[in-house]
Image (spheres, grey):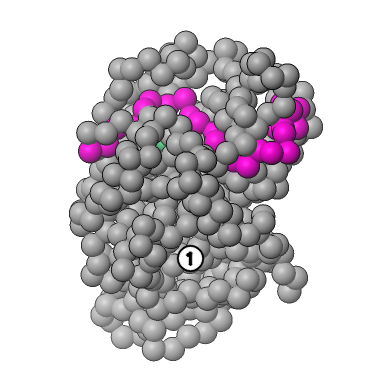
Amino acid sequence: MRDVSRPGPADEVAYDRLRSGQWLAGAARADGMSRRHLLALLATVSTAAVLPSASRAVAASTADSGAASTVTSATASAGGIVKPLPAEWFTVRGTNAETRWQALRETGCLTPADRFFVRNHTTTPVIDPARWRLKLWGSGLRGAPGLDRAVEFGLDDLRALPAVRHTAFVECAGNGRSLYATQQGQSVSGTAWTLGAVGVARWGGVRLSEVLRRAGLDRRAVDVMPRGLDDEYVTEGVNLGRVRRPLPVAKALDDVILAYEMNGEPLPYDHGHPVRVLVPSWVGISSVKWVGDIEVSAEPLYSPWNTDFYRLFGPAHPEGGGPPLTRQTLKSAFELASGETFDAGREYVLHGRSWSGAGGVREVSVSTDAGATWRPARAHDAPRRDVWTRWSVPWRPGTPGRTELLARATDTAGRTQPVEATHNTQGYFFDAVVRHPVTVV
Ligand SMILES: Nc1nc2c(c(=O)[nH]1)N[C@H]1C(S)=C(S)[C@@H](COP(=O)(O)O)O[C@H]1N2
Ligand SMILES: [Mo]
């Protein structure tokens, strides 16, 4: 099969080393945060155990964020999410909603927007598209010295630019987090997702590279930092400001989209209406929703979302954390509820999906006897980067009792799901083979 994976934009690890060096040398800015504050944040990585109903501490900020004029109000509903969250499709976790895997059983490759998981740091803002503006600004844009280098685009301006469409998953870096506790007996902090913080959609919009070029991208630019128009995020008594995370210019110019459509419809409120950033194959936090401005910088940028969050901390990782997370890991899931019941002696076809941030999925093996024996699953899709591969296996359950279903994928980059995921204090990147409990009666 054709390997559809491509080498990463530049060398992400080397890039981070360089920018860390620049930062320590005082050559980088951290968007208003003092370096002391950043170091303090880095030192206080919480290690609270995942609780089934864990929710992030959330406080609505009353500070005028400068975006208030385009934000009318947040619609009240479970956890500040606008769309209905029927219990057969979603598990609500604080301000977030996790898709139930059995709810994907009737769906095709694309996850309908009404079943797509929502990860909100605060609440969904309802933004008037007619008044929405995207502002690009910063030292990484050209412009006569002394003049304001900011450039603004309205939604119509973006729609007038060449449109692109790309099918890609959005997956939270913490997807599968609760399995560190339930399968490996380890403590981690953060939202206790099972495997439903992922969905695939066809995103339509304009290339970020196109917009950067028109805004006057300077060749000295190194980072771009999109920022959301949702409320400032307050956690453990600290206001971290609005959600924002820098992207290296190399990635920004590669395959990143400013998306205004999801599955052929205008972006729904909860998924970033009117425009979100879509960063294919990377951790979900990169895909900033409700984007209001993008700083383009000739110096490396930092925010809490690439310093104290979305790095790997813990004994197995470098002191001070590993590099900022980029590509998603490799996972598999059955389109089944946990603990589902099967009749002994009956013929079933088990369905599931596997996906990777490093390329397409090349093969999947399944065990229906808790890992004793394995057989290849039948793939329903060709390996394709940024998209899951659907698969199935026939199964006739034998003796009644409890057992476990396991699926193990290998991607086109040669990665195979391990038996155990490497622990990190914030529970990111759970990539191990998941033991899915079922009962045969
Ligand atoms: N502005 C903003 N963008 C955001 C977030 C947020 O809370 N605010 N959450 C991020 C995280 S952590 C994830 S996993 C994805 C989730 O995208 P979805 O809610 O459309 O599924 O959005 C990202 N973009
Ligand atoms: Mo996330």
Q: Is residue 92 above or below residue 398?
A: above
Helix, strand or loop under label 1: strand
Q: Which stretch appears magenta?
A: 212-236
Q: Residue at x 54, y 33 (%)?
A: 226
Q: Nearer the viewer, residue 423 or 200?
A: 423
Query: Is residue 235 located in the magenta-colored stretch of the structure?
Result: yes
Q: Is residue 117 above or below residue 161?
A: below
Query: Is residue 134 located in the magenta-colored stretch of the structure?
Result: no
For the C terminus, the quadrant is bottom left
Q: Nearer the viewer, residue 311 or 108?
A: 311
Q: Residue at x 30, y 17 (%)?
A: 62
For the residue marked with disc 1, what is the amino acid?
Lys
Q: Residue at x 45, y 36 (%)?
A: 30
Q: Which residue is mark 1?
A: 331
Q: Toward which corner of the image does residue 77 lie, by quadrant?
A: top left
Q: Residue at x 61, y 25 (%)?
A: 137
For the N terminus, the quadrant is bottom right
Residue at the extreme right? 162
Percent of width and height locating residue 64: 38, 15
Whether residue 150 sits left or right of residue 105 in the image: it is: right
| Badge 1: residue crowd in 10 Å (few <14, some 14–19, many ≥20) | many
Percent of width and height locating residue 339: 29, 66
Q: Is residue 193 visible?
A: yes
Looking at mark 1, is its residue's CB closer than 8 Å to ligand 1? no
Percent of width and height locating residue 152: 65, 18
Q: How many marks?
A: 1
Whether residue 132 sits left or right of residue 79 in the image: it is: right
